[in-house]
Amino acid sequence: MQEDLTNNSTENSPIYNQSVLLLDGRSIPQIGMGTWKIPDQESMDKAIDAALEVGYRHFDSAESYENEEMLGIALKKGFEKYGLKREDIWITSKIAAWRMDYENAKDSIETSVKLIDCGYLDLSLIHWPTSICGEAGEIGRLETWKGMVEMKQKGLVKSLGISNFLTRHIEQMLSQVGDEKPVINQIEIHPLYIDEETIKTCQHYGIALTAYAPLATFDEKLMKNENVLKLAEKYGKSANQIALRWGIQRGFIVIPKASSKEHLLSNISIGDFSLTEEEVQLIDQLNIMFKTDWDPKDEP
């Protein structure tokens, strides 16, 4: 459930700071910062400092990004500089395909908590539907989930979710996991790729959707689209901001990757305008199922 679709909570401020209410009762900031491919400590320090300064409180990571220790160091510096506490920040990490079994899943969560030095994860996701270290398919997913649930019971993670799961993966999992259901599915979503079947499945079960690659890796088919540019001109915004605002109004959590203060500020400065329903539908029509990343459709 989204707590606010159209308005920022600080009057006249462009900074968008609304949250999405999850099935487990927790709230996640609707705009986050992706940390993939931030290569070194200096770059991470600059990016996290800028993000915290302009208002980000949600950071998306993964063990496979190989920079979680750098993220933790940068966050500690930011906490001290900006007077923040651990509970002010949302941290997501992910369990890689080569960690997908019961014991490895537990170790992956423990490793991320240790590397980030954050005490607990706000959210742990199964990064990919199929294991490459244990049983493939449904068995691997369920064994991984059991390990994740155990870590939640121990307090090392507060919410559990999935990533890149399609309808069949979701329904298989929901039929087996009992009361501890995934609260988020993180999938590729942008105006050029809208997997309505998976989106509708998640909405049916109350699973929130996080959109990764929400700017379609800046593909010209989106960034130079005539209708997008007309909307950008109408609202005095960039094509990036129109695309992100569309995602927000569709109810998605969005995690654009940026590292410069200029781009970080631009991405979060979408709280002072709203698209009309007709404009959202106009952007929906850009969908050509153009994927920028791996496709899980062939995963058992």
Image (cartoon, rainbow, N blue to C red):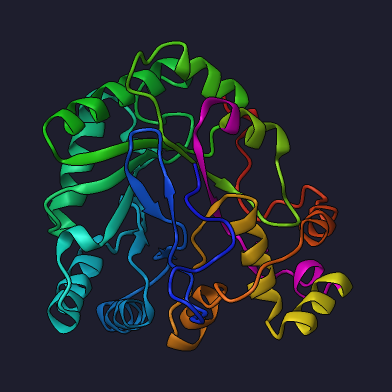
Magenta stretch?
203-225
- Residue at image x 32%, y 22%? 180
- Residue at image x 16%, y 48%? 120
161 to the left or right of 85 = right
287 to the left or right of 83 = right
**x and y percentages locating residue 221 in the rendered image:** 81, 67
- Viewport quadrant of the C terminus: top right
Residue 241 occupies which quadrant of the picture? bottom right
- Residue at image x 19%, y 81%? 82
Asked if residue 215 shows in the view, the reply is no
**x and y percentages locating residue 175 in the rendered image:** 47, 11
Q: Residue furthest right?
A: 226
**x and y percentages locating residue 56 in the rendered image:** 37, 71
**x and y percentages locating residue 297 in the rendered image:** 65, 32
Q: Is residue 97 above or below residue 279?
A: above
192 to the left or right of 80 = right
Residue 181 occupies which quadrant of the picture? top left
Foreground: 141 or 193? 193
Q: Is residue 280 above or below residue 72?
A: above
